[in-house]
Image (tube, rainbow, N blue to C red):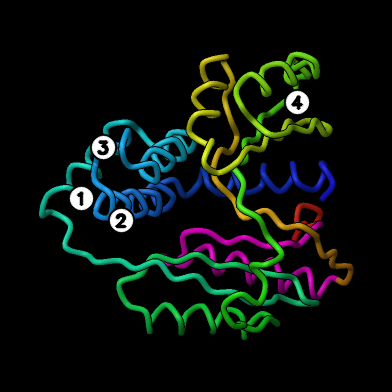
Amino acid sequence: MSGHSKWNNIKRKKEKTDGAKAKIFTKIGREIAVAVKSGGGDPNVNGKLRDLIAKAKANNVPNDNIDRIIKKAMGDGDKNNYENIVYEGYGPNGVAVIVECLTDNRNRTAGDVRHVFDKFGGNLGTTGCVSFGFQEKGVFVINNEDGEYDEDKIMEDVMDAGAEDFSMEEDMVEITCAPSDFSNVLSALEGKGYTFETAEVQQVPNTYVSLTDEDSMKKMSLLLEKLEDNDDVQNVWHNWENEGDYEG
């Protein structure tokens, strides 16, 4: 995936996110509530909760909101019982798609997800049909449009923080780490003064698929947009290489 395409895509997603903060806050809050119910409300003990708090802060969720969600989930205020479901399938021209959901109605969610795939030229597959082509990684993206970050300094800080690797492409810096190191790396880099455009554990594709015809690009863009708009969908991962080049 070229840096140009990736960075444009991140900026476009961030612009959309800025216009829909309430939905983002709700989805992250749901993840936090589920993590608290399954592993307790102490992030020092509950590693999943610790990572989600870090993700929430990177998405500018206020600390008061985070504390309120945790307290509610620890008490009897939240009666919803959500389950994690992961769907896998293909978009136009074989683009691999992973859809992570939290739902209180499995049948509703399955129907909604299948409808989106069918409507926009994709098809829902079986469990494991595309996930073998992804690997889980902690990913941090830093805006470097002003060119303030020197490569040697970044390398020193990244290695000192315990990350695995980094790349500097055009106007961005991308840092990766093992999923288990996500919270520690985030804390270390924040301690060095870095702020992030995105910071979360992602499903990173091993290979990418490029779309060249306008119809396929339009359908793929709509497929992703409609999935992400669904309240039950938490994350959508894919290996469409040139998403950021599609203006739609």
| Stretch of the chain drawn in magenta | 214-241
Q: Place residue 97 in its image quadrant.
A: bottom right
Task: Name the residue at the left extreme.
Answer: 76
Looking at the image, is 241 positioned above or below residue 131? above
Q: Quadrant of residue 242?
A: bottom right
Closer to the camera: disc 4 or disc 1?
1
Give the CA distance from mark 2 to mark 4: 37 Å
Q: Are marks 3 and 1 in contact (CB under 8 Å)?
A: no
Between the residue at mark 3 and the residue at mark 1, the CA separation in whole angstroms equals: 12 Å
Question: Reading the chain from its start, which is encountered first: label 4 or label 1?
Answer: 1
Say the numbered circle drawn on residue 84. none
Give the label on residue 73, or none: 1
CA–CA distance in space, label 4 to label 1: 40 Å
Whole-percent x and y of residue 191? 51, 16
Cβ–Cβ under 8 Å for marks 2 and 4: no
- The residue tagged 2 is 34
- Identified at 75% across, 20% down, the residue is 155
Query: Element under label 3?
Result: loop
Q: Give the CA separation, mark 2 to mark 1.
A: 8 Å
Which residue does the numbered mark 3 point to in the structure image?
Answer: 42
Q: Amino acid at mark 3?
A: Asp
Q: CA distance from mark 2 to mark 3?
A: 13 Å
- Judged from the image, the secondary structure of the residue bearing numbered disc 2 is helix
Label 4 amino acid? Glu
Q: Seen in the image, is 5 located left or right of residue 23?
A: right
Residue position for label 4: 145
Residue type of the residue flagged with mark 1: Ala
Q: Earlier in the sequence, mark 3 or mark 1?
A: 3
Disc 2 or disc 4, which is closer to the eye?
A: 2
